[in-house]
Amino acid sequence: MKRALFLSDNEFINDLYTVNLSTYVDTDLEIETDPHKIEERILTGSFDLLVTLSMIGEIDAGKSLIEISQKKNLPLIIIGEKSEVSNTPDVVTIPGNLNIQFFLRSAAKLLGVTAQDMANKEVGEYYPMALKVLIGLTEAPCDVFYKISKPGQKEEFSLVWSKGQPIDKKFDKFKDLKIFSLFIPSSERLSITNLVTTKISQKVKDKNLSQGDRLEAVESGFELMAQSLFSTEEIAEEVLEISNQCVEAIGEVLEVDSTLGELLQSMLNNKSRFIYMHSVLTTYVCHYLLKKIAWGSKEHIEKVSYVLFFHDMFLVPVYNDHADIKYEEDLIFSPDLNDAEKDIIINHAKEAGNALKSLPKCPLGVDTITTQHHGATNGIGFAMDPGDDVSPLAKVILIGEAFVDEFLKARDEGLEPNCKKIVSDLLERYTNKSYQKMSKHLETIKL
Ligand SMILES: [Fe+2]
Ligand SMILES: [Fe+2]
C-alpha cells in the first residue's frame, strides 16, 4: 500500500480523503495537523505523496512544503487556491471543495495507480475502515468487525455491530484503546465509502455548524459554485481548466502592466462573482460554438478565450461597489449608478480594446473583437439587435454571453436551464441571420 501525508486541520476533509483514498487508490493517508511538525514527519517517514490544504490558519501551507517536496522528490497536491504556489507548475492544484473525484484522480495519477490496478487488486474477505469514519453515523452501515491477531495464530474477526445496530459505547472503548481501524466485508467497501462520503458532505453543508467547521472555511468560491452549476463532473472539470487558463493569462499581464493589475487582481480575488464567472462560462460556451461552426479553428478558440478573460475588466470597480447587480445590461438601467459609473459602463468595451492594444503578448485582432463585444463597432454602448458590421468572432462572443446570461438567470430562479428554450429566446432577440445560425448550434450544448 502506498503512503501519503496530508497537512490539514480540517477534520471533515481528513475523514473524507482518508476513506476515499484507501478505497479507490489503495493508499494510506496519514494526517498531520501542525505545520510546524510536518517537516520532521516527512523526513522520518517514507511517503509517496504529499498533500496539503493551501492555508492552515494564517500560514501558507502550500508554500511551506514546496521546498521539501522538491528536495525529497515527492509530488505535492495543494487543495485550494489561496497559497502563493497554488496553480504554479511545480504543484498539482485542486479545488478546495468536496468534489472528491478531482482529488482521487490527481492522487492516482501521481502515484501511478491505474483503474486497472484497482480492479485487479486482491482484497481479503475483510477490509479496514478507519474508526473515525463511523463518527456521526448512528447505526452500523454494514456488519463491522474487530480483528483479533494473536502471535502464531490465524487472524480472527469478531463481529462488533451487525448492520443496522446502533453504534453504542463500544465505539468509545475502541477509541480509548487507541484502536483506529475496524473491518467491514470487502464486498461492501465501495458502497460504504460512498455512503460515508455523502454523510460527511451533508455534515459540511449543515448551516448550524460553526464557521470553522464548515468546509467553506477552507475555501469556497468559484469551484464550489461551478460544481453546483453543471450537470456532470466532466463539464465542471473543463470549466475549471478554462479558469486555470484565465488565471494564467491574467498572471502574465499582471507581470508586465501594473496599471491594469489592480483591476485584474480584484477580479481574481472574487472568482465566485458574476464578472469572473460569466467570463469563464462564456469561454466554455464559445469553445463549443467554434467547434460546431464550419470555419472555427483552434486559433479562434485561443483568441476568443483571450478576449473573454479581459473584456469586462473596466467594469470591476463598478461591480465591486454594487455587489447586488449581476448582469451587464442591468447595470445600464440601474438607478443606483452615478453618471461617472454609467460612463464607464457605456465605454467599457472601447476602453478594454484600447488597453489590450498595448499588451505585448496580445494575439492579433483581439483588441478589435474586444471593442466590438457588445455589437457596436466603436465599442460604445450596447447594440440591441447587432448586424454584420462587427467581426465574426465578436458575434460568437455576443451569442455566447447572451446564452450564459440566460443560463445563469434560470439557475438564479432555481430552474433547470433548458437550452432549447434559451436558444428560442435568442432567435427572437437577434434577427440577423448569421447570429441566428450561431445560436441554433447551442441547442445541443451540455451544461
Ligand atoms: Fe461580459
Ligand atoms: Fe461587456
Image (cartoon, rainbow, N blue to C red):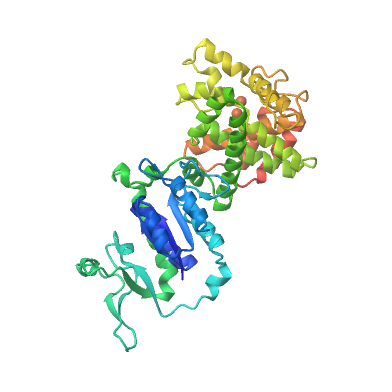
Instruction: State the image coordinates of residue 377 (x, y, percent, origin top left).
Output: 73, 20
Give the quarter of the image for residue 212.
Answer: top left
Left or right, 167 with reference to 235: left
Can residue 178 be seen from the camera position used here? yes
Q: Nearer the viewer, residue 261 or 429?
A: 261
Left or right, 43 with reference to 259: left
Can residue 329 be seen from the camera position used here? no
* Image mark count: 0
Query: Ligand 2 is in which quadrant of the figure?
Result: top right
Looking at the image, the residue that sits furthest to the top is: 339
Q: Nearer the viewer, residue 155 or 325?
A: 155
Q: Quadrant of the C terminus?
A: top right
Instruction: State the image coordinates of residue 329 (x, y, percent, origin top left).
Output: 57, 23
Residue drawn at (29%, 59%) of the image:
136
Left or right, 365 with reference to 316: right
Q: Nearer the viewer, residue 119 or 398?
A: 119
Looking at the image, the residue that sits furthest to the right is: 295
Above or below for 91 versus 167:
above
Q: Nearer the viewer, residue 146 or 194?
A: 146
Give the quarter of the image for residue 127.
Answer: bottom left
Give the quarter of the image for residue 184.
Answer: bottom left
Instruction: State the image coordinates of residue 52 (x, y, percent, origin top left).
Output: 43, 52
Instruction: State the image coordinates of residue 169 (x, y, percent, origin top left).
Output: 19, 67
Above or below for 126 versus 21:
below
Residue drawn at (57%, 25%) of the image:
258
